[in-house]
Image: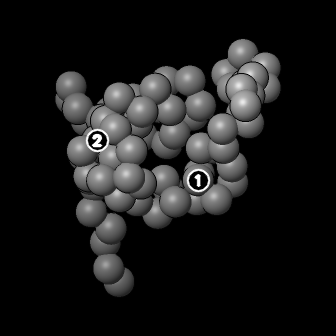
Amino acid sequence: MTIEPWVSVEQVAQHLGVAKDTIYRWREHRGLPAHRVGRLWKFRLSEVDDWVRAGGADEEQRSDGQTPSRTA
């Protein structure tokens, strides 16, 4: 049985191709699965991938329930 390693915010950001600030924002406002270890946030990439597949990173989803406005 292989144990999945815990990864850092930096590693999750690189995995998803987004900024670290986006990871923190998604964790706080959109429920990105994370686990507090001391003062650090740690992640399991399988949980992050499941969250993305379930639509957690979808731009149509906002914490205030509003759909983002689109400008042409």
Whether residue 20 is situated above or below residue 12 in the rendered picture: above
Q: Determine whether label 2 and label 1 are within 8 Å by CB.
A: no
Q: In the image, which disc is placed on residue 9?
A: 2
**Amino acid, disc 2:** Val
Q: Please name the colour scheme applied to the rendered image.
A: one colour
Is the C terminus in the top left, top right, bottom left or bottom right quadrant? top right
CA distance for labels 2 and 1: 15 Å
Q: Position of residue 47 (x, y in %)?
A: 50, 56
Whether residue 57 is situated above or below residue 29 in the rendered picture: below
**Amino acid, disc 1:** Val
Relative horizontal placement of residue 7, taking residue 57 as reference (left or right): left
Label 1: element kind = helix
- Nearer to us in this view, 5 or 18: 18
Residue at 67% x, 22% y is 63
Relative horizontal placement of residue 12, taking residue 54 as reference (left or right): left
Whether residue 36 is situated above or below residue 47 in the rendered picture: above
Residue at 59% x, 51% y is 51
Residue at 34% x, 38% y is 19
